[in-house]
Image (cartoon, grey):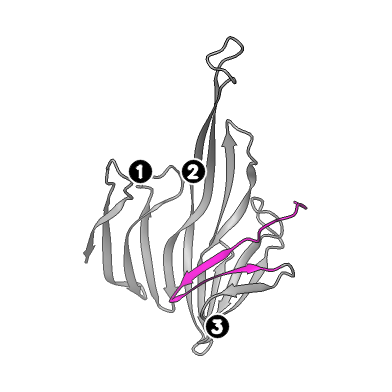
């Protein structure tokens, strides 16, 4: 928006045994913090979707020492979000910003083999932060005034994706999904993976079913996968 940015954005990655972080310097070059020898490039959108800021980074490509090319993001494989604050004067980010890029393809130049990851979109909303401020007159209780309070809630909306399938040649891994997670405020799309099946051509050779349950506790407990069955 033309304002100075006092701190560069920090990007992190973790895939297939490779992990690290990187950021852009003042010249726009990558500075990579990783023990592996990687080459990273990116692509900005020229005809951006209406919801995305023009010039946003839409895709990253990472080349690994073995020659494999990993592509993250682009059509249907990125996540963007916006944040609105209620009850207080905090900067709102109503224009969605791309915040995550999901693995889209793996290309092996030696065999020309390609793994393709397919996703479907979903949308969730949650309170990112909550704070309450109390104000009192200098002398309280006092006839000069009364106490006051202000509640500030920052609500974040994530426009994300969920994995549908992985395709490679005549082999496919299909994931069955649903909107069954009651711990999420799901506005649209599926948020829960219920199982998967592996197909060669169109024949299913292996199938797994995930049984999930929500655990209620007085402590901070996340939903757990309670069982896994194989057919």
Q: Circle 1 is placed at which residue position?
A: 182
| 1 and 2 marks in contact (CB < 8 Å) | no
From this viewpoint, which residue is outermost toward the front? 139
Closer to the chain start, of discs 1 and 3, is 3
Q: Position of residue 182 (x, y in %)?
A: 35, 43
Q: Which residues are magenta?
A: 1-25
Q: Quadrant of residue 8?
A: bottom right
Q: Residue at x 54, y 17 (%)?
A: 140
User: Magenta span has 6?
Assistant: yes
Taking depth in this image into account, of 147 and 175 the one nearest to the observer is 147
**How far is mark 1 from mark 3, CA to CA?**
42 Å
Residue 43 in the image: above or below residue 110: above
**How far is mark 1 from mark 2, CA to CA?**
13 Å
Q: Position of residue 86 (x, y in %)?
A: 57, 33
Q: Give the number of the disc on residue 37.
A: 3
Circle 1: is it few (<14), some (14-19), or many (20+) Cα within 10 Å?
few
**How far is mark 2 from mark 3, CA to CA?**
38 Å
**Tag nearer the camera, 1 or 3:** 3
């Amino acid at each position: 928006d033309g304002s100075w940015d006092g701190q560069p954005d920090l990007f992190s990655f973790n895939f297939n045994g490779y992990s690290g972080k990187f950021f852009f310097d003042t010249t726009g070059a990558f500075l990579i913090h990783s023990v592996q020898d990687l080459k990273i490039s990116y692509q900005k959108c020229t005809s951006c979707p209406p919801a995305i800021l023009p010039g946003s980074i839409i895709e990253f490509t990472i080349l690994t020492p073995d020659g494999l090319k990993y592509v993250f993001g682009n059509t249907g494989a990125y996540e963007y979000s916006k944040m609105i604050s209620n009850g207080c004067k905090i900067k709102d980010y109503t224009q969605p910003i791309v915040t995550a890029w999901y693995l889209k393809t793996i290309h092996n130049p030696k065999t020309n083999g390609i793994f393709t990851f397919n996703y479907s979109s979903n949308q969730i909303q949650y309170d990112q932060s909550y704070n309450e401020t109390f104000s009192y007159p200098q002398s309280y209780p006092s006839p000069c005034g009364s106490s006051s309070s202000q509640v500030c809630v920052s609500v974040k909306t994530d426009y994300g994706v969920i994995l549908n399938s992985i395709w490679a040649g005549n082999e496919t891994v299909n994931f069955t999904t649903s909107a069954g997670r009651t711990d999420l405020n799901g506005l649209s799309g599926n948020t829960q993976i219920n199982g998967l099946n592996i197909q060669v051509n169109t024949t299913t050779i292996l199938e797994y079913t995930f049984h999930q349950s929500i655990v209620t506790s007085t402590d901070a407990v996340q939903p757990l996968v309670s069982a896994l069955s194989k057919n």
